[in-house]
Image: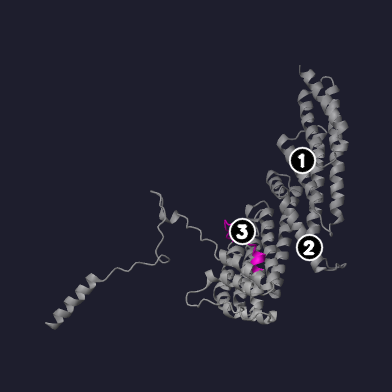
Amino acid sequence: MWPMKRQDKEARNRVAAPTLALPPAAAPERSAHRPGAPRSAQPPAPTPLRGVREARDAVTLARLLRGTITPMRADEVLALLEPHRPRLVPKPLNPLATMIGQPQGRLLEALLRPTAPIVLDVLLPRLRDHLIDRLVDGKVSAEDALPSALDVAAAMKSLVTLLRGAGRGSMVAVVAALEADARADADRLVRAAPESEPGDPSSNIDALAHALLRFETRRLVLETLGSTTALKDIVYQSRRLTRFALRRATDGVEGFVADRGIKALHASLATLDSVDGLVVVVLRNLDDQEESREEASPFVEPADRKALNDYLSAAWRLSDTLFELVGKAANGGELGDLLFEALLRQLGALHQFCTRIDHAGRPATLDTLEQRLVERTNALARLAGERLIETILARPCDLAKARRLLARSQSLTQLLYDMGHEEELEELAMRLVVAREALKHGAA
């Protein structure tokens, strides 16, 4: 009997036992699934940026603790930290209510005593997660009032300093994550595709310039956190990536000098059209040269200076090639209209690049190249105008050649105008107006 009763009791318990539901965090999310599509193709929902409220409140807390500590200021601090207080931590009372007239150091120490557990256990770990999400994973928030990453890092540093080094582990975790991410970024960009073409989207100038701006952000954050060792590694990786970007740009413009085919033209256009990216890369290189202050010798040239000089030499040789081809077209030679416009676009991009490098260490080569671009473009525009008039006055008049020369004279004049030399255009513009009217009457 007893074994049977025991079995019946166990069966009743199994029937009456309630089913356990998974908590919301562990329950599998049910994503919308389109009929006919494989479930593996559904993209995962992006995780939100962590620690948004804690970052905002930490910046406010650091500002409050830097000011004059009073009982009213203590009430503000306690009210600010109340939403972050863990349940098991008792609600702190204002310790300054009976300390009126005490020195500021004692007031601050008394205020930090009940609030330190909240800062150590809640705020600093959430600031760590917030900075890693923003600076490493690239997450963003839709909130407009979100403080900058530098302000959050400064608040973290200030709180750790006020707590006399307590909570430093959160700050070290941010530094380690930034250092590892920077090294991985540089390795991926420099070593991933060493044999890729200069115009490849994976290693184009805009992408490299964007990566350099991310390095600059990491650098500022590490300076704020006061990590000198990691900062040196970030500076090294940034200089390494800058030199690589200049080598890619040099390969892009040098290719068209050696091989004037369509593929080389495309690579050259892709490089020179990235004017903003080139400016970022060159300015970063000039900053690196100024910070390192390496002295050149007759036998050794600093790597940063060599990378920039190589690019400027390649740009100079490219301008020679472009003016040679454009000169033949302006003199009446046969050249496709699309190719002619592409050559002029490269000349305009070279001039724009020269004018936008505003730096104390600006090389004199840029000034010489800028002046040369303007002078030779002006000479070619006048040459095209003279050949246009000669073609119109010739008998019989070659109307097709005259129209081609008119279009190219207009393009050269427009390029000269874009270079900012309007004072030299009055005679050229008048010549084009007369030629256009003559061609209208000649065609009629």
Decide which of tag 2 and tag 1 comes sooner along the chain.
Answer: 2
The N terminus is located in which quarter?
Answer: bottom left
Q: In the drawing, what numbered circle is on residue 344? A: 1
Q: Amino acid at mark 1?
A: Leu
Question: In x, y percent, where is residue 296?
Answer: 85, 67
* In this view, 108 is above or below 131: below
Q: Quadrant of residue 347?
A: top right
Front label number (3 vs 2):
3
Residue with the mark numbered 2:
287
The reply, left or right, for residue 16 in relation to residue 207 is left
Q: Amino acid at mark 2?
A: Asp
Q: Is disc 1 surrounded by few (<14), some (14 to 19) or many (20+) residues within 10 Å?
A: many
The reply, left or right, for residue 117 in relation to residue 198 is left
Q: Is disc 2 surrounded by few (<14), some (14 to 19) or many (20+) residues within 10 Å?
A: some
Determine the secondary structure under disc 2: helix
Mark 2 and mark 1 residues within 8 Å of each other at the beta carbon: no
Residue with the mark numbered 3:
145
Q: Is disc 3 surrounded by few (<14), some (14 to 19) or many (20+) residues within 10 Å?
A: few
* In this view, 99 is above or below 177: below
Q: Amino acid at mark 3?
A: Ala
Query: Which range of residues does the magenta coloring cover?
Result: 138-153
